[in-house]
Image (cartoon, rainbow, N blue to C red):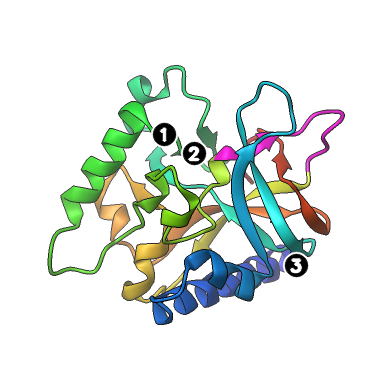
Amino acid sequence: MAQELFASIIASMHLQNLFSTLHNKKHEKPSEILRDTFGFLLKRQESSIPETGLGVYLHGRAKKGYIVSMYPGTIYFSGDPMFLVSLNNSYILKCTNGFFFDGKPYGLSKYIFKSLYKRINYPGVFPTCDISWLEKNDEDLKNPLTIGQFVNNGTSIYKANVRYQELEIDSLPIELWKYIPNIHYANNESIAKAKKVVVLVATRDIKDEELFSTYIDVS
């Protein structure tokens, strides 16, 4: 338990460091900042698994235990209305504590995320989250980690090399909230100081390869 807590603290610090660098170097490309900070780039490309569409490729190196991506989308609790948005939706990630992350970047899911964003973000206030993950072009992402929803499930041939991990970032400065790719369906949770996120963590050292995970409940 102590080891897991320590790992979560380190992961949170790594994210805050990336967010701070993105904030302080606004005129540099986020993808280049990610490369300089974490040592790799992420790209959405045709998956090496036949007939699965896009996948996520890591160009560079990532050590075991390091964050390699984030899972964006609307956060629902078990009592929130999500029946319609869940229909034919393979992008919903279930957490063991009763939360669900909907990372679908189009259709009703996209409409709901944008509507929630507009509800609490207006001119003159600090943005409470990142909405750029809905863009199709990797170069348009303000936070270059936010393509975790495109990571494909591993197979007997393509072994999983990442796992999902829930993380809570405590006391994140308000000016850095704009890099969090999630918004709560319940309005009061979106302005909480502790930010709930799901990250993808390397289960082994990774070098220049596609990321694969296992679609199971997030621990």
Question: Where is residue 137 drawn, in percent x and y?
Answer: 45, 47
Q: Residue at x 39, y 45 (%)?
A: 135
Between 97 and 86, the one nearer to me in the picture: 86
Label 2 sits on what residue type? Gly
Question: What secondary structure predominates along the stretch shown in magenta?
Answer: loop
Q: Which residue is mark 2?
A: 98
Q: Is residue 10 above or below residue 59?
A: below
Q: Earlier in the sequence, mark 3 or mark 1?
A: 3
Local SS, label 3: helix
Residue indicated by mark 1: 78
Q: Among all residues in the image, which is located at the extreme right? A: 157
Q: Position of residue 153 (x, y in %)?
A: 70, 32
Q: Residues within 10 Å of mark 3 (few under 14, many from 20)?
A: few
Is 124 part of what is drawn in magenta? no
The residue lying furthest to the bottom in this view is: 24
At label 1, counting other C-alpha atoms closer than 10 Å, the crowd grade (few under 14, some 14-19, many 20 or more) is: few
Q: Is residue 76 rendered to the left or right of residue 18? A: left
Q: Which residues are magenta?
A: 150-160
* Mark 3–mark 1 distance (CA, rounded to whole Å): 29 Å
Q: Are marks 3 and 1 in contact (CB under 8 Å)?
A: no
| Whole-number angstrom distance, CA of label 3 to CA of label 2 | 24 Å
Instruction: Mark 2 and mark 1 in contact? Answer it, CB < 8 Å.
Output: yes
Mark 2 or 1 closer to N-term?
Answer: 1
